[in-house]
Image: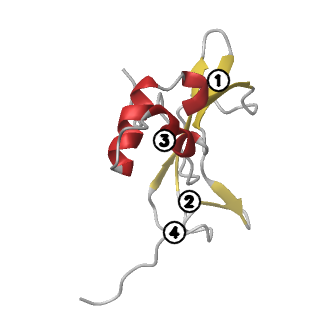
Amino acid sequence: GVSLGKRTLKHLDYGKMAATFVDVAGGTAVRVSARDDARALAALYAAGESDPRRAQTVAYRVMPERDLLRIEPVVLEPGWLERRRVRVFCQQCGEGINYQREVRADGRTLCRPCSGERYYTQRRGP
């Protein structure tokens, strides 16, 4: 199976509905994304439905794949599938960093949050 922890599944939140599937042995990849115009087309496939959500569900079951999804062959950036497990420690907070995700700044090894790429602020007090 696949899992985020074993790096056989990667999650990147770009605010899009898409997935890329990779044949690691063969080196080929395909990106599948939801077509933005699929909702508008749904009315054509479920003309008898008055509830828009129900119409969408009914339509998506019968719509041709080409009307629902955009499927395109892609080439991954070099090193994207790198699987060597290297663990280093942030010299500021001490937390472990896996898979070469550390940042080098002023001669120090830092995790991304300590380097300024923080998505949170530490809460002070109760």
Residue 119, disc: 4
Q: Is residue 53 left or right of residue 91?
A: left
Q: Is residue 120 left or right of residue 116?
A: left
Mark 3 to mark 2 CA distance (whole Å): 49 Å
Q: What residue would you read off at disc 3?
A: 43
Residue at the extreme top: 26
State whether residue 2 is above or below residue 126: above
- Label 3 crowd (10 A; few <14 / some 14-19 / many >=20): some
Assign a secondary structure to mark 1.
strand
Mark sitting earlier along the chain (4/3): 3
Q: In the image, what residue occupies the spot 60% across and 45% down?
A: 36
Q: In the image, what residue occupies the spot 52% across and 44% down?
A: 39
Q: What residue would you read off at disc 2?
A: 111
Residue 97 location, x and y as percent? 50, 50
- Label 4 crowd (10 A; few <14 / some 14-19 / many >=20): few
* Nearer to the camera, 37 or 19: 37
Kind of residue indicated by mark 3: Ala
Q: What residue would you read off at disc 1?
A: 30
Q: Is residue 43 left or right of residue 110?
A: left
Whether pointer 3 and pointer 2 mark residues with C-beta atoms closer than 8 Å, the reply is no
